[in-house]
Image (cartoon, helix red, strand yellow):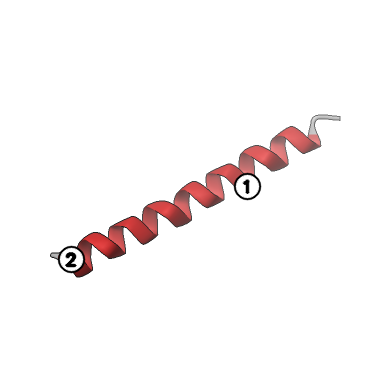
Amino acid sequence: MGGGVYDHRLTLLFVQQCYGMTLNFSLVYLV
């Protein structure tokens, strides 16, 4: 059952997206 691996990948992708959005907002506010 590779559910754990899939869940981990999904969580990593979600965190990466959130981090990217935060970085974009920071750049917008800085500029």
Per the image, label 1 sits on a secondary structure element best described as helix
Taking the view exactly as shown, the residue that stands out farthest to the front is: 30
Disc number placed over residue 11 in the picture, else none: 1
Residue at 70% of width from left, 36% of height from top? 6
Residue at 68% of width from left, 40% of height from top? 8
Query: On the image, which quarter does residue 30 sit in?
Result: bottom left
Mark 1 neighbour class, 10 Å CA radius: few under 14, some 14 to 19, many 20 or more: few
Residues at marks 2 and 1, CA–CA distance in whole angstroms = 28 Å
Q: Dot 2 corresponds to which residue? A: 30
Taking the view exactly as shown, the residue that stands out farthest to the top is: 1
Instruction: Name the N-terminal-most of marks 2 and 1.
Output: 1
Residue at 13% of width from left, 65% of height from top? 31
The amino acid beneath tag 1 is Thr
Query: On the image, which quarter does residue 23 sit in?
Result: bottom left
Judged left or right of residue 24, residue 31 is: left
Judged left or right of residue 9, residue 25 is: left
Taking the view exactly as shown, the residue that stands out farthest to the left is: 31
Q: Position of residue 22 (x, y in %)?
A: 37, 61
Mark 2 neighbour class, 10 Å CA radius: few under 14, some 14 to 19, many 20 or more: few
The amino acid beneath tag 2 is Leu
Q: Is residue 3 above or below residue 15?
A: above
Q: Nearer the viewer, residue 28 or 10?
A: 28
Per the image, label 2 sits on a secondary structure element best described as helix
> Which one is in front in this view, the residue at disc 2 or the one at disc 1?
2
